[in-house]
Image (cartoon, rainbow, N blue to C red):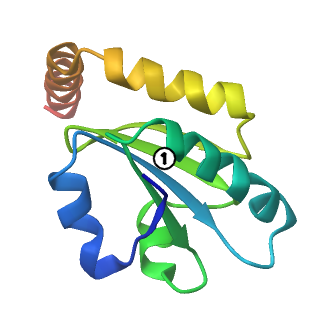
Amino acid sequence: MASVEITEPKFSDIIDNNSIVLLDFWASWCGPCVAYGPVFERVSEDFPDVVFGKIDTEAEPMLAQSFNIRSIPTTVAFKEGIGVFIQPGALPEEALRDLVTKLADLDMDEVRTEMEAQKAAQQDESE
């Protein structure tokens, strides 16, 4: 599956209805973004069950702001609707492939348990 352009109206639906979603926050004037685009596209072709979405920070400033994007490109990954990875800078192709493989193997029950533990710890601190 080739990468898809993601806009704010489609964002929640894509995150909520796909197991694994990788996002590339980019802009056309950004040299590293332009160089990373073909890498992101190549890897997307090899993982048809994963949604590879591109978010143009110029066209979708509110999405970029909601993720506190400070530099581009930035790669963000979701699994089962939960954000599990964010990294600014272009990832080398092998690192991006490795990320997709690790996301597939990620135990989301463990992630949810850890999130609940962190939430409980924060509540204890605020009391």
| Secondary element at image label 1 | strand
Q: Which residue is mark 1?
A: 76
Residue at the location (38% across, 42% down)? 48
Q: Position of residue 110 (x, y in %)?
A: 20, 13
Q: In the figure, 12 relative to 105: above or below?
A: below
Q: Quadrant of residue 4?
A: bottom left
Residue at the location (43% across, 36% down)? 47
Judge left or right: residue 92 versus residue 21. Answer: right
Q: Quadrant of residue 93?
A: top right
Q: Position of residue 88 (x, y in %)?
A: 66, 47
Q: Quadrant of the C terminus?
A: top left
Q: Position of residue 91 (x, y in %)?
A: 70, 38
Judge left or right: residue 56 versus residue 47. Answer: right
Judge left or right: residue 18 versus residue 46. Answer: left
Q: Amino acid at mark 1?
A: Val
Q: Position of residue 114 (x, y in %)?
A: 22, 17
Residue at the location (58% across, 40% down)? 43
Residue most toward the right? 31
Residue at the location (51% across, 45% down)? 44
Q: Nearer the viewer, residue 98 or 107?
A: 98
Q: In the figure, 30 relative to 85: above or below?
A: below
Residue most toward the bottom? 59
Q: In the figure, 88 relative to 12: above or below?
A: above
Total marks placed: 1
